[in-house]
Image: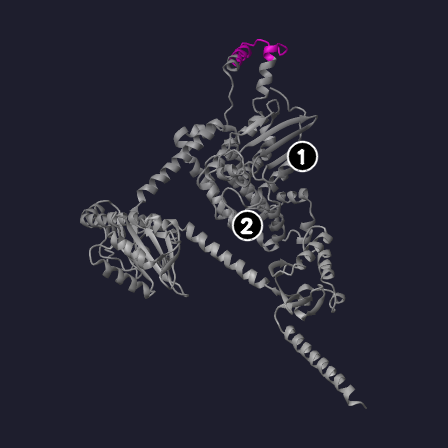
Amino acid sequence: MDTHQSEPNLASRRGESAHELATTHLQALLDVLPQGVSVCDKALSLTLWNRRFNQILDLPQSLMCKGVRFEDVIRFNALRGDYGAGDPEQQVQAIVARAREFVAHRFERVLPGGRTVLVEGMPFTSGGEIAGFVTTYTDISEQKQNEEQLKRQRDEVKTIIDNFPGAISLCNADLRFTAYNDQLMTLLGFPPELFAKGWVDFEELVRFNVNRGEYGPGDPEQQVRTAVERARNFQAHRFERLRPDGRWLEVRGSPIPSGGFVSIYIDVTERKRIEAELLRAKELAEARREQVTSLLDHSGQGFLSFGVDLQVEAECSRACSTMLGLHPAGRDAAQVLFGADRVKAELLRETVAAVLNEPDPWQCVAMLSLLPVEFRCGELLLRAEYKLLEKQRVMVVLTDVTGERLLEQKVQSERQRLEMIVAAITDSRDFFDTIQTFREFASVGLATLLRSGAQPARMARELYRQVHTFKGLLNQYSFGQTPQALHALEGRLEELRQLGAQVTQQALAEALQAVPMTELLEADLRPLREALGDDFLACGERILITGEQTRQLQQLASQLLHGEPIDVTLASIRKLLLALEQLHKMSFSQALGSFERLIQQAAARLEKEVAPLVVRGGEAVWIDPQHWRPFLRSLTHVFRNAVVHGIEDPNTRLDSGKSELGSITCSVQVSGTQLQLSIADDGVGIDLAALRQRAVGMGLLASQAVAALSEEQVMELIFLDNVSTLQEASDLAGRGVGLAEVRSQARKLGGDVRVQSARGQGTQFVFTLPLPCDIFGA
């Protein structure tokens, strides 16, 4: 072999091997760089790149090979929208043209995926000539996010500073004010030129204040040094400073963890003025304390105070001893006020302990309102007011309201007496009918029902209905004791009804015997006897006739007494006889109008406002009261329910866009032999959801069955016994038997009733009743 020929080849191979090794090392070096790197030669062909370059730009493998044209890479980017809207080819040509200039460049580019890339290009030379350029691609997305977050934080801080009600400043670790608001210059009187640089040194600011006398007399430089030394401690501080212009400033400083401190300056001039006035007032109050004590002793009220230990303090008004029957000083307040009533005494102890540990004054007032307002102490009825005092103390103000309550009871009794008298005179027909019917019920009806042989459970239901109805009727005429006793009897009958088949006739009889109905009725009628006499009650119902009718009757009597014949065909005689025939009857509109009293009584007790009852039609429809009385009595439940369940209180009605006055309207229409009566209110309507829950709770229907009912079927549930949407019964409503009685009486007349309701708009009961052939007259 020719050694001279092999030596150059060997050297060439060694050079190639060294070049490959250097290239490998260079590629390895590039691949570990966090940035993407690409190298293009002078012909703008890709000669070198690293993995990060492809990761950032996400190029296809077909473009990841040596010799690929820069133009092809740019075209790929343009076609997938990397450069935004526009003609892709024009974008390619523009970018390639700039690249051929081989000028150093640096810009940020947002990729379609939302990442931000910093692109930096630098041309390189070989042999003194441009040989290509190297470009780096740095993903700065996280950096941009951090910058944006920092900008937002700075904006937030600036907003807080600018909108702070007082002055605020931020001083860095070098004691330089770097942030502040306009209030700082306004409140502290700094000239704008002091902050012309956008910042000011703490020492410079202090020196300005010293020179204008803000810190009072003394060596100016010593004052500056003292203030600067204190500031360098970066300790939290709070003090008040009186400015030369007479304004008081409260200065608060808090250190910043990174160094420096934030300070706020609040103008407390007004607060200081108020504090000074309070101090003067306190001194004046102290001076007058003895005068006040003397006044309290002669006020007729009891004043005592105590702390968390409930030991009554020494200073008590003299009235305390009179009202409580002992001198309370030094004694336990709970024992003094409530004696043997352990429940009230314990309530006082727990409430006082909670109040004196509660920082919120409104919560204290709310808790004190839970304490007993009135209580008996011997023969006296005392009213208590509880007030929270300073220094963890509570004051109780006692007032003797015994006479006041007795007077109220007398006024209430007199009002009921007058209402009963007015009702007896103006509505004598219904008034005396109610009395007579109740007497028959108490003396005969109860005994008859108990001897009827009916099942006790059925007896209980019937007794319950009748007692409930009579309670409402007697309430309507302002009877006092009897309705209250009937309400209590209702409660007992309800307990027996709940026993179902286990209730006994003896238990029913014992419950009835416990209520002396006749005696109670007579006691309620006693004021009426005293005012109008026994004859008034003995005569009973009054019928009014006109003066003309009286004259005609006198003439008719005179003719009959003289044996003169009466010609009944004469128009005047016939008219008189027809009028006399109708005297025992009443118009249907008159019967409905008599419920106005009931409506207004119920509304007043519930603090509701209802317009006068409107009755349309029925003036020409005359009915026999004896025949229609049970049905008319049952309508008491309809009208009372309209007020209790339907009509809202004035505030609720106003919030709903309604008039403060609720309305109840009756409409009477005659069609053939049918009489249609409508009773409607404009109240809240029937709560169907509550009715469904009540039906399930009573076990009337399963929840699935109730859910399947239509609205009309659900509303029919109100006519069942013991169904009411009220959670608690009262002497007005809530037992759930009234409407069952209404339907029962309507059907006894041969008619029926249905109900219509719209939530928020009102409820209407529509009765269809048979019309007797002789119903028209008068």
Q: Residue furthest right?
A: 1
What residue is at 37 percent from the left and 40 percent from the top? 409
Q: Is residue 334 above or below residue 269?
A: below
Give percent across and percent down for residue 743: 63, 39
Q: Is residue 270 magenta-colored?
A: no
Q: Which of the pair 374/379 is nearer the observer?
A: 374
Q: Secondary structure at mark 1?
A: loop
| Amino acid at the residue labelled 2 | Glu
Q: Is residue 571 magenta-colored?
A: yes
Give percent across and percent down for residue 625: 58, 29
Give percent across and percent down for residue 288: 19, 47
Q: Which residues are magenta?
A: 552-573
Q: Which of the pair 161/341 is nearer the observer?
A: 161
Give percent across and percent down for residue 739: 60, 41
What residue is at 63 percent from the left and 49 percent from the top? 692
| Amino acid at the residue labelled 1 | Gly
Which mark identifies residue 494? 2
Q: CA distance from mark 2 to mark 1?
A: 29 Å
Q: Is residue 45 above or below residue 468?
A: below
Q: Which of the pair 692/149 is nearer the observer?
A: 149
* Residue 640 relative to residue 45: left or right: left
> For the residue carrying disc 2, how many other residues have a C-alpha within 10 Å: few (<14), some (14-19), or many (20+)?
some
Q: Is residue 194 above or below residue 754?
A: below
Quadrant location, the N terminus: bottom right
Mark 2–mark 1 contact, CB under 8 Å?
no
Which mark identifies residue 392? none
Q: Residue furthest front?
A: 4
Q: Residue furthest bottom?
A: 1
